[in-house]
Image: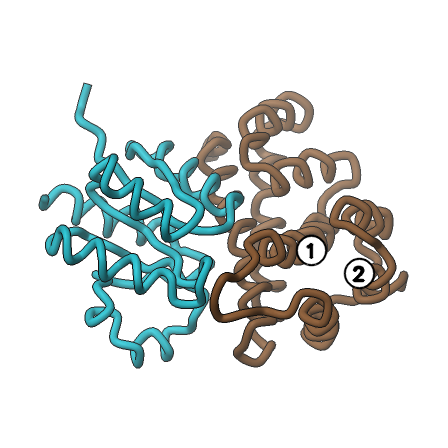
Chain colours: A cyan, B brown
Amino acid sequence: MADKKKVLIIDDDPAICESVKAILDGSGFDASYALSGKDGLEAFRKTKPDVVLCDMMMEDIDAGAKVAKLMKAERPGLPLFLLSTIGDATANTIGLGDLGFSGVFQKPVNFDLLLAVIGRFAKSK
Amino acid sequence: MGASLTELFRREPDLASFRRAVAALGGDFPLSSADMIELGTAYFERFPDRVHDRNAEEVRFGYAIVRAAVIEKAILGLAPERRPAFREMLEDVSRVGPAVEGLLGSAGPEMLAADIERLSAALAALRATIDEIPKGMIKERFIGGISNLFNILYVIRMKAPRPDPL
């Protein structure tokens, strides 16, 4: 059996986590999720995912940025994407790279694009 | 038109009763961007947002009331006998597999494919209405709420067989 790439979803909305997990699992990934930045960091250290998808506003309004910074410090090459409700214009001005994110997917997420992008990142690892 | 969502939100004490009240309207309620802003304003009056130590339950409640409203509008264009199956799927992604199987048996793959396209168009129209809301926390709740419905629509497409080409 082919080795499935692990994706960690961090979002405080369980419904979003479940639906994103269903899409990723159904597309050949091995997805798991955490419902807060704190739990996400713990899951990141425990499961060593190939890719992380992280929301911004969780227990704090900038929890995603805090978690991203810590994860990138531990694994600088980690493909880490922001799942966000902020608009493209805002995303362009807040400096996602400086926060540690490899890119951003606006909600509602275009999953054809997301699957293609994370597939490419996971393969290049 | 029935009662406004804001009236229901102020009247109903919890999420379950709000959902029941919204579903009882059968989609007969206004849902313009002004209605969304009014509902969002009432929600934030009850649950003011915070920068730190945000209450996850209150945030999820916000997404849930958005979904309750948007689902009823989104399924309005479907045949009444198939609305419950789509409501069930849009409320809980784990129900997609069994519900799709049920719809394939009762309505067939062509009808299911047509329903999926109708649902997709209805969600896109509702998304366009949400886009009219000025940037801010009310818009965030509405985008967060409807996003999950788009995710579930994607799962429905994954599970539904493609109809045979002519």
Mark 1 Cα within 10 Å, few/some/many (few <14, many 20+)? many
Horizontal relation, residue A57 to residue A115: left or right: right
Q: Residue at x 25, y 36 (%)?
A: A46
Horizontal relation, residue A4 to residue B60: left or right: left
Amino acid tagged 1: Ile
Q: Which mark is residue B9?
A: 2
Horizontal relation, residue B16 to residue B146: left or right: right
Same chain under badges 1 and 2? The reply is: yes
Q: Residue at x 89, y 64 (%)?
A: B1
* Residue at far front of view: B53
Check disc 1 and report the residue beneath it: B65
Amino acid tagged 2: Phe
Residue B152: % across, % down = 52, 43
Q: Quadrant of residue B33?
A: bottom right
Q: Are marks 1 and 2 in contact (CB under 8 Å)?
A: yes
* Image quadrant containing the N terminus of chain A: top left
What's the CA distance linking mark 1 and mark 2? Answer: 8 Å
